[in-house]
Image: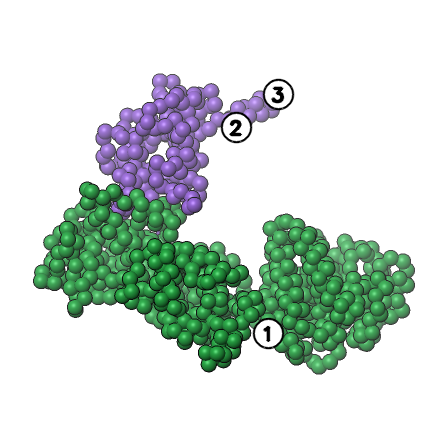
Chain colours: A green, B purple
């Protein structure tokens, strides 16, 4: 039986990534003055597991880095190394480095050698300075007083392992059936020379001469049997490498199902005369308190599935819904009496299809915790750089959002958080002088509201400065006036190249970014609102649709063509009365709706629809709102409301001005989903184009559309 | 001996390429058959506003939104009619699916390299950049279209230029 170990690369990468994320979380939560032993152990375990896996798969640099890191962590958890903030920072940096190395291996590259050496030097230096030890071990560094006592007490063991030269390992199999045992022995023979074997089902020993380390052997065997069924120890042996003596301590391994890096114990060697058995028994068998298992049950209740597969299911369900509504249309013409059974069946199918669709869509939803969990790190680092004291509060971590959106929201949100820390929250002294607590508060919250998710970044800083924004806007040549509403003034910070920071800092203030933030969020079908009070702070609110895959739509008819309006943008609809319509300079028309004058955009004009109703009073005005702008959209008829599956136009075509996407209707034909903001822009550009004295600007608009 | 013959034959055949021959008006064109995904009727096309006239719109191809281009309009043919014979050749070009409207599909031809002559410099309507050559088949001449180049070219306006 041959196993191709490369098959397990992906599993290793994914698990290592999770371990690193775990490690980061623990490092961030760590209280420097009174570190929690449990957390230190968890960090150590993560490093240890990655090291084991890296060794198995031959990722040298990753293994070496984790080895040093693990040793240092081991000293830390034994209390020999006193943590300081800067040491934790170094640990975090090391963790980042491990991430980079992992990425490099994943992409089939070798990790950055220079970075590797640098981090090794840093770690070594900490070891030398803090505990006077060389992490590589074996180089005549100070003896390690703490190591031996901490090692597990040797377990009783059979001793028919032959003594001799070379690396001898005794592999003990506990309660392994005949068939598996044969496989394992064959497997061991691949790894080295089997010198002796014997025993019965409950305890079978194989003595092996091999250059492969115990960790690796165990990792391989764990594919076949559980970790607690295997014990590996060095056979009594004169020469033993001291190198890893200090990491001898075995931590309680988790009773996890076989996997490549299932907590391989560090069994490389035993120091002379001190025969230690290293196993991965599932019971906590090291020093101290019987620790609870780190994670329990979590793995058995969820499975890892690639996003592609989920998307495929979603697409198929979308097709099913379309087919179902096609059938529905055909069946609706049938007679209720003669075809009652069929009609009943159809309505059952419809209900089932909707339920299925909802269930499938929920697969894609992941909690906001996925996004928020990375902010403690961002806040900590940024606050450190700026010399500010910040308390980060997150609310609504369990709010769920479509996975594709969570991924895309991270960058804009990071930018907003940095911005709040840099420009919003004042330095401690200033805060104190203003009668606030020295520690600034930054709140990240998420909640559902209708079909939207609302994400807020709230700081209790100085708030936006209206005068400064206006001054700056004038300097930049933006058209502003003192009578602008606060909301309009706040929106100025999203203008390209706009920055009110007095000086450019490392963190922000270059004036690039806020416009990108706004564009990104608009690209996701959302928008940004700002609320700010001088001296009390600023709230930036991002409103996003819950999912991009399905849209609550209102179908409208113009001429013979059908379009879909996003229901979230529709405020109301009404039949315009003649006395409420006012013509303005040229061909512009405004509609008076309850003391408000709204610009009018006719769909047939913007989209060149033939045979549409041109008499304004015969049309229906749908009042829509997009990006804070309200206007009346003239359509011929309202057809109905329905959920539509959003289909990207750009997959095979390109972006169309005034159109955000397409969908497939019940009859199998394609309908375009209108982009409320884009439509307004398009109609204005068209009107300008019609004026002979002006240069046509439709091209300019298309270009602008392209950029966004 | 037999084997060597077969090998030689296979080698020769390896250079032969198969083309789908379609007609636009009275002219015969050909595209590499490996680019063709399927052939279907012209129906249910949703118009796209503010697009060039040769882009007829988009259609639903089993859940995928596919743009439909009328090559007859693009090539300035006099007679553009939509009837029972009008078909759409669905081609797969650089991971994009595009339908092209033609007057009819006649057959599949195998052309050897010797049968494909280089295309002369043409006028403005159809730049020779978009042609792989001219196929000569007894008394017929096939204009072999380089469908990749044609459909991804700027002037087809099907593909967005890479954003700067």
Q: Residues within 10 Å of mark 3 (few under 14, many from 20)?
A: few
Residue A73 visible to an observer of this rendering? yes
Q: Residues within 10 Å of mark 2 (few under 14, many from 20)?
A: few
- Residue at 38%, 49% (x, y): give it: A707
Whole-percent x, y for residue B92 in the image: 41, 40
Q: Residue furthest top?
A: B139
Describe the element under mark 1 as helix, strand or loop: helix
Q: Give me the C-alpha separation between circle 3 and circle 2.
A: 20 Å
- Residue at 47%, 20% (x, y): give it: B114
- Residue at 71%, 63% (x, y): give it: A123
- Numbered badge on residue A407: none
Marks 3/1 in contact by CB < 8 Å: the verdict is no
Whole-percent x, y for residue A70 in the image: 71, 66
Residue identifier under label 2: B14
On what subunit does the disc labeled 1 rest? A
Say whether residue B60 is left or right of residue A228.
Answer: left
- Residue at 44%, 75% (x, y): give it: A460
Check the image and report above or below for B39 versus A277.
above
| Front-lying residue, A200 or B12 | B12
On what subunit does the disc labeled 3 rest? B
Residue identifier under label 1: A29
User: Which is closer to the viewer, label 3 or label 1?
Assistant: 1
Q: Give me the C-alpha separation between circle 3 and circle 1.
A: 79 Å
Describe the element under mark 2 as helix, strand or loop: helix
Marks 3/2 in contact by CB < 8 Å: the verdict is no
Could you say which quadrant of the image residue A555 lies in?
A: bottom left
| Front-lying residue, B30 or A327 | B30
Q: Residue furthest left?
A: A579
Whole-percent x, y for residue A372 in the image: 50, 69
Check the image and report above or below for B132 versus A174.
above
């Amino acid at each position: 039986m041959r196993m191709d170990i490369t098959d397990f690369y992906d599993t290793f990468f994914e698990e290592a990534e999770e371990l690193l994320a775990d490690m980061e979380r623990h490092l961030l939560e760590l209280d420097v003055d009174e570190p929690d032993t449990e957390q230190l152990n968890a960090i150590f375990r993560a490093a240890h597991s990655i090291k084991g896996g890296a060794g198995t798969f031959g990722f040298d640099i990753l293994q070496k880095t984790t080895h040093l890191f693990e040793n240092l962590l081991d000293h830390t958890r034994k209390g020999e190394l006193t943590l300081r903030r800067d040491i934790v920072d170094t640990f975090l940096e090391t963790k980042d480095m491990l991430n980079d190395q992992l990425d490099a291996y994943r992409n089939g590259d070798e990790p950055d050698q220079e970075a590797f050496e640098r981090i090794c030097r840093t770690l070594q230096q900490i070891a030398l300075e803090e505990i006077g030890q060389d992490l590589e071990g074996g180089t005549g560094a100070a003896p390690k007083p703490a190591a031996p006592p901490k090692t597990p007490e040797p377990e009783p063991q059979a001793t028919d392992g032959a003594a001799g030269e070379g690396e001898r390992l005794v592999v003990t199999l506990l309660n392994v059936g005949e068939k598996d045992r044969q496989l394992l022995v064959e497997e061991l023979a691949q790894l080295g020379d089997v010198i002796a074997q014997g025993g019965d089902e409950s305890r079978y020993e194989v003595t092996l001469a091999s250059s492969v380390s115990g960790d690796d052997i165990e990792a391989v065997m764990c594919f076949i049997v559980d970790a607690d069924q295997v014990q590996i120890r060095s056979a009594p042996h004169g020469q033993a490498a001291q190198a890893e003596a200090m990491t001898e301590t075995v931590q309680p391994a988790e009773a996890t199902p076989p996997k490549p890096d299932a907590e391989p114990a560090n069994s490389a060697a035993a120091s002379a005369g001190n025969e230690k058995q290293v196993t991965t028994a599932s019971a906590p068998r090291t020093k101290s308190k019987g620790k609870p298992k780190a994670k329990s049950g979590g793995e058995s209740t969820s499975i890892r599935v690639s996003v592609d597969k989920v998307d495929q299911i979603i697409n198929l369900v979308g097709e099913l819904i379309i087919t179902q509504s096609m059938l529905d249309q055909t069946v609706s013409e049938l007679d209720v009496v003669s075809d009652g059974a069929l009609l009943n069946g159809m309505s059952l199918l419809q209900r089932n299809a909707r339920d299925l669709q909802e269930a499938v869509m929920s697969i894609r939803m992941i909690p906001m915790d996925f996004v928020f969990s990375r902010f403690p790190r961002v806040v900590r680092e940024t606050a450190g750089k700026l010399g500010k004291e910040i308390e980060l509060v997150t609310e609504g971590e369990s709010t769920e959002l479509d996975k594709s959106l969570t991924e895309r929201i991270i960058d804009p949100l990071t930018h907003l958080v940095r911005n709040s820390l840099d420009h919003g929250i004042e330095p401690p002294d200033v805060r104190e002088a203003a009668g606030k607590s020295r520690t600034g508060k930054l709140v990240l919250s998420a909640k559902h509201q209708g079909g939207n998710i609302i994400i807020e970044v709230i700081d209790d800083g100085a708030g936006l400065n209206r005068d400064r924004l206006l001054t700056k806007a004038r300097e930049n040549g933006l058209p502003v006036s003192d009578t602008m509403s606060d909301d309009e003034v706040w929106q100025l910070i999203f203008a390209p190249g706009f920055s009110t920071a007095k000086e450019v800092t490392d963190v922000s203030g270059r004036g690039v970014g806020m416009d990108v933030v706004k564009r990104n969020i608009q690209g996701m079908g959302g928008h940004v609102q700002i609320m700010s009070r001088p001296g009390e702070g600023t709230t930036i609110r991002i409103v996003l649709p819950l999912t991009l895959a399905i849209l609550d739509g209102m179908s409208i008819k113009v001429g013979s063509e059908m379009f879909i309006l996003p229901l979230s943008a529709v405020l109301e609809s009404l039949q315009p009365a003649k006395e409420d319509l006012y013509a303005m300079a040229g061909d512009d028309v405004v509609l008076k709706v309850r003391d408000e004058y709204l610009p009018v955009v006719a769909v047939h004009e913007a989209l060149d629809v033939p045979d549409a109703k041109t008499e304004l009073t015969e049309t229906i005005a749908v009042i829509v709102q997009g990006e804070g702008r309200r206007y009346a959209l003239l359509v011929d008829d309202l057809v109905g409301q329905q959920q539509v599956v959003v289909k990207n136009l750009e997959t095979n075509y390109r972006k169309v001005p005034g159109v955000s996407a397409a969908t497939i209707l019940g009859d199998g034909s394609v309908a375009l989903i209108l982009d409320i903001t884009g439509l307004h822009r398009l109609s204005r550009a068209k009107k300008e184009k019609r004026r002979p004295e002006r240069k046509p600007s439709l091209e300019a608009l298309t270009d602008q559309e392209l950029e966004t | 001996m037999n084997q060597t013959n077969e090998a030689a034959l296979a080698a020769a055949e390896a250079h032969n390429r198969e083309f789908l021959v379609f007609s636009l008006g009275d002219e015969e064109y050909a595209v590499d058959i490996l680019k063709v995904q399927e052939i279907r009727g012209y129906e249910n096309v949703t118009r796209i506003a503010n697009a060039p006239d040769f882009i007829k719109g988009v259609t639903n191809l089993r859940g995928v939104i596919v743009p439909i281009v009328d090559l007859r309009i693009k090539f300035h043919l006099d007679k553009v009619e939509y009837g029972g014979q009008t078909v759409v050749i669905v081609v797969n070009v650089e991971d994009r699916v595009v339908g092209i409207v033609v007057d009819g599909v006649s057959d599949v031809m195998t052309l050897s390299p010797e049968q494909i002559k280089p295309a002369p410099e043409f006028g403005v309507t159809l730049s020779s950049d978009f042609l792989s050559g001219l196929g000569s088949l007894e008394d017929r001449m096939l204009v072999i279209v380089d469908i990749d180049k044609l459909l991804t070219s700027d002037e087809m306006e099907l593909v967005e230029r890479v954003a700067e």
